[in-house]
Image (cartoon, rainbow, N blue to C red):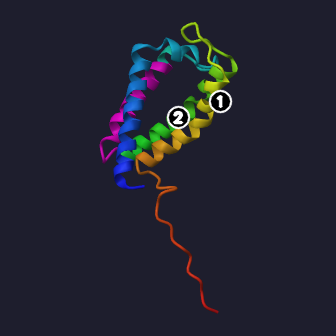
Amino acid sequence: MKERGRTALRWLLALAYGYAGYLHVVRPAPFIAITPPWVPAPEIVVAATGIAEIAGAIGLMIPQARKAAGLGLALYALCVWPANFHHALANIAIGGETLGWWYHGPRLAAQPLIIWWALWASEAVDWPFGKTEVPQRRSP
């Protein structure tokens, strides 16, 4: 994939994480509701995750911070995955509405893609679009 595509997807990821972070800070109730019960101080954790998302989004736009931001966002996405499972398995209502497996199934399956996206958009990894070397055959 050309650099233009990577840049566009980096911007899209930064906008998504920036907006999600904003929502975590200004409208935390839905995120607190899906936080697993074993997480201490969910209000503080949700606020901190919102700040982390915003910081990661900004970091993606700063070349010197880009890889660290991508690694941080990938780790973040891995760490919040249990909340997505809790949301699905406990069938937690948000705003009085429950979401079925039509939402939860793809959402849970997409989390590894989101983790990869953060790594790829930040240039921490090139897979699967990077250059690969073809092994040279040795003559006998």
Quadrant of the snapshot with the C terminus: bottom right
Name the foreground residue: 30 vs 41: 30
**Residue visible at 57% across and 36% down in the picture:** 111
Q: Where residue 37 is drawn, which disc sits there?
A: none
Residue range highlighted in magenta: 45-65
The reply to whether residue 42 is visible in this rendering is no
Residue 20 at what x, y percent from top left?
43, 25
Picture coordinates of residue 30, whole percent (x, y): 52, 14
At mark 2, the secondary structure is: helix
Question: In the rendered view, would you say 118 is above or below 124?
Answer: above
From this viewpoint, is residue 68 visible? Answer: yes
What is the number of the mark on residue 105? Answer: 1
Picture quadrant of residue 102: top right
State whether the magenta stretch is mostly helix, strand or loop: helix
Three-letter amino acid code at the position of disc 2? Ala
The local crowd at label 2, few if under 14, some if 14 to 19, many if 20 or more residues have their Cα within 10 Å, is some
Disc 1 marks which amino acid? Gly
Say how many tags the image has: 2
Between disc 1 and disc 2, the foreground one is 1
**Which numbered disc covers residue 77?**
2
Q: Residue 57 colored magenta?
A: yes
Furthest-top residue in this view = 96
User: Distance from label 1 to label 2 (Cα)?
Assistant: 16 Å
Locate residue 118, reporting x and y percent: 46, 42
Element type at marker 1? helix
The residue lying furthest to the front in this view is 102
Residue at position x 55%, y 41% in the image: 113
Q: Residue at x 56, y 12 (%)?
A: 94
Q: In which quarter of the image is the N terminus?
A: bottom left
The furthest residue to the right: 89
Is residue 46 found inside the magenta-colored segment of the image? yes
